[in-house]
Amino acid sequence: YLDTATFFLFGGSINSLFGETSEEAQTFLTAFDHAMQGSGIRIALGPFKFLYPYLDSGWLKSCKVTHEFADKYVAKALEDRHLANTRPCTLLSGMASQTDDKLTLRNEILQALMAAQETTAALISNVFFLLSRHPSVWHRLCDEVSSAPDPEFDEKSLLNMHYLRNILNETLRLYPVFPQMNRVALSDTTLPVGGGVGGEKPIFVPKGTGFDTSWYNLHRLPSVWGEDADEFRPERWDDFKPSTWQFMAFGGGPRGCLGRMKALTEASYIVVTLVRNSDRIESRDGQEWRGKVQLTMKNVHGGKIALWRA
């Protein structure tokens, strides 16, 4: 996914799958991962985030390497937009056609890369982690895949696979790739609920107040998902349709994830392809799922499974 993400964003793949990653690109990836990890820790530190550079002396250097790598592509995108007979073919070139603010372009492209890094891969890993521990779900998915009328599995046919979509939704419910959201009030405001004894009254929020909302906890509320909220049960999606603000795997509202359909389509295709070519799955990891939280969340143990070719 790093290859497809960097091609889509920058216009050039880093070719990690082919072992052809340049030294410059590898340096960037190492720095970018370090910068993301430090950013996640700074969010957790809250008002004490200014201390982090003193705790991790290399973090600012990693940020600098990351910025310089992105700035090179920003400069090229701004230069190329003036060429005749060219049209935007990457996200960066499309944004460069709208603004020449280099800082804005750098920030936006790095944010997009952050959202693309390991997110779909973490979802697929979690899917197979759960399938390997729930044989009845695996067999039902195999039946759906084998009975699908379109062996090529284009976008439309993938999106019509009902049980597969249930599995993806249930996986994202239990293990959201983005487990929380942090916001700061830029001005005095009022929230419609949260005040009063029962938390059902409006509440005043002064400027500068920080908010930390946990989608991980929201997705496991028994009041919303039932007493089996901690269990992996894709069938719950057959007869329960959560509201926009009860299932937040891709956020909601005007700032919801723009890559939602891209991520679901990619994950669906990989899952279906592996299932179609396998007739058995087995867990090779007796450890329980344990989250590693940076700006995103994944299983610290990875997804250790075995598949038998059909």
Image: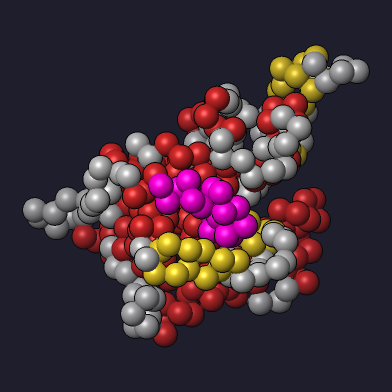
Residue positioned 48% across, 74% down in the render: 28
Residue positioned 67% across, 66% down in the render: 300
Q: Quadrant of residue 44?
A: bottom right
Residue positioned 71% across, 76% down in the render: 57
Instruction: Determine if residue 92 is in view.
Output: no
Residue 56 point in image, percent of width and height: 73, 73
**Image position of 273 (left or right of 192):** left
Which one is nearer the viewer's eye here, 103 or 215? 215
Q: Quadrant of the C terminus?
A: bottom left
Q: Quadrant of residue 69?
A: bottom left
Residue 2 point in image, percent of width and height: 41, 66
Up the image or down, 18 lies above or below 12; here it is below
Residue positioned 80% across, 16% down in the render: 200
Residue 231 point in image, percent of width and height: 69, 43
- Decide whether residue 134 is among the magenta residues: yes
Q: Quadrant of the N terminus?
A: bottom left
The furthest residue to the left: 85
Q: Is the stretch drawn in magenta largely helix, strand or loop? A: helix
**Image position of 125 (left or right of 69):** right
Q: Which residues are magenta?
A: 126-143
